[in-house]
Amino acid sequence: MPLLLTELYTSYILTPLGYMNAITDTDSVLALEFDDKYTSGEILNGAVSIQIANELQEYFSGKRKLFTLNLKPQGTVFQLQVWEKLLSIPFGKTISYNEQAVQLGSAKKIRASASANGKNPIAIIVPCHRVIGTSGALTGYAGGLWRKEKLLQLESGSQQIELFSQ
């Protein structure tokens, strides 16, 4: 059977919280992560990256609460289960790591589910920022706790993040 290769695109999308590096194929998002080292300007490659940029702009301006992008994250079976559960957390709501573990079948899975959150390759769209400590404390976010705080403030309506400077 012949091996089918998919063309991949790398893009850099400017958001109010900094640049994000997007890896896409012709119809899906494979990764979307904050990139604090990139500063050279926005680069959009492929139709999916344009859709990401548009949906993120709507999200940050308060006009979008649900993303419509096709997602194709790569991970273990357990990581994929965790990331799928993250998609069920409603906009503006949070759950604790303990609640997340229970939803995945056992409170004993708390460390494994927290670890999977930390490896989430699709920031914002797969909303791992909506998972907080049992005490309500903001803990763990690969993009930085300051970004997690800003995202939760945006979603709670307590703060509007400045729109893109373009």
Image (cartoon, rainbow, N blue to C red):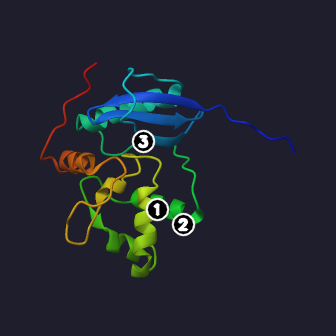
Residue 133 or 104: which is nearer the viewer? 133
User: Percent position (x, y) of residue 42?
Assistant: 39, 22
Say if 103 sits above or below 149 in the image. below
Q: Earlier in the sequence, mark 2 or mark 3?
A: 3
Q: CA distance from mark 3 to mark 1?
A: 15 Å
Q: Residue at x 37, y 51 (%)?
A: 142
Residue type indicated by callout 3:
Glu
User: Percent position (x, y) of residue 154?
Assistant: 20, 45
Q: Is residue 57 left or right of 122 when viewed as pictured?
A: left
Q: Which mark is residue 33?
A: 3
Residue type indicated by callout 2:
Phe
Whether residue 63 is visible, yes or no, is: no
Q: Which residue occupies the extreme right position in the image?
A: 1
Q: What is the crowding at mark 2: few (fewer than 14 residues within 10 Å), some, or many (at least 20)? A: few
Q: Is residue 156 left or right of 38 when viewed as pictured?
A: left
Q: Mark 2 and mark 1 in contact? Answer it, CB < 8 Å.
A: yes
Disc 1 element? helix
Residue type indicated by callout 1:
Ala
Q: Which residue is mark 2?
A: 78
Q: Residue at x 50, y 31 (%)?
A: 48
Q: Quadrant of the C terminus?
A: top left
User: Percent position (x, y) of residue 11?
Assistant: 48, 28
Q: What is the crowding at mark 1: few (fewer than 14 residues within 10 Å), some, or many (at least 20)? A: many
Say if 53 sits above or below 34 in the image. above
Residue 156 or 39: which is nearer the viewer? 39
Q: Earlier in the sequence, mark 2 or mark 1?
A: 2
Q: Quadrant of the N terminus?
A: top right
The label nearer to you, 2 versus 1, is 1
Q: Which mark is residue 116?
A: 1
Q: Residue at x 46, y 55 (%)?
A: 119
Q: CA distance from mark 2 to mark 1?
A: 8 Å
